[in-house]
Image (tube, grey):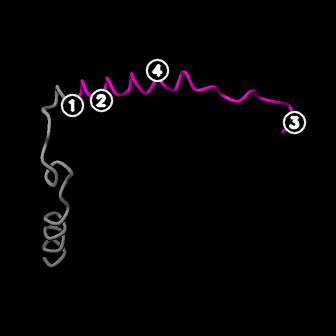
Amino acid sequence: MEQRAQEQQLELLMLTADEVTPRLFDVATRTEIVNLLKALLSDRLSLVETPAETGDD
């Protein structure tokens, strides 16, 4: 009985991120923003030169 009471208390304390922070955007808008940011980051990273590998390891 006490075990279940402790579990219920723990469940009350464990809030998800959605419950703690208010949503700024709806799901569709958030998905579009994330996709655009990924595309932008991918474009920028493709411009970064990677050091040439040498056999001196």
First in residue order: circle 3 vs circle 1: 1
Cβ–Cβ under 8 Å for marks 1 and 4: no
Q: Which mark is residue 43?
A: 4
The magenta segment: 30-57
Circles 3, 1 touching at the beta carbon (< 8 Å): no
Report the front residue among 9 and 49: 49
Q: Quadrant of residue 24?
A: top left
Q: Amino acid at mark 3?
A: Asp
Characterize the magenta stretch by its predominant secondary structure. Answer: helix
Residue beneath disc 3: 56
Which numbered disc, 1 or 4, marks the residue that appears first in the sequence?
Answer: 1
Q: Which SS class for mark 3?
A: loop
| Residue kind at label 4, given as amino acid type | Asp
Q: Quadrant of residue 23?
A: top left
Q: Nearer the viewer, residue 56 or 47?
A: 47
Q: Position of residue 47 (x, y in %)?
A: 55, 22
For label 4, the crowd category at 10 Å Cα-Cα, with few meaning under 14, some 14 to 19 and many 20 or more, is few
Question: Please, is residue 11 above or below residue 5 in the view?
Answer: above
Residue 27 position in % (x across, y down): 16, 31
Give yes or no for residue 42 being in the magenta stretch: yes
Q: Is mark 3 in CB contact (under 8 Å) with mark 4? A: no
Task: Tell me the mark number nearer the camera, choosing from 3 and 4.
Answer: 4
Residue 21 horizontal/vertical position (percent): 16, 51
- N-terminal of the pair, mark 3 or mark 4, is 4
According to the image, label 1 marks what residue? Answer: 30
Label 1 or label 4, whichever lies nearer to me, is 4
For the residues labelled 3 and 1, the Cα–Cα distance comes to 46 Å
Marks 1 & 2, CB-CB < 8 Å contact: yes
Q: CA distance from mark 3 to mark 2?
A: 40 Å
| Label 2–label 4 contact, CB within 8 A | no
* Crowding near the residue tagged with mark 2, few <14, some 14–19, many ≥20 C-alpha atoms within 10 Å: few
**Are circles 3 and 2 on residues that touch, CB within 8 Å?**
no
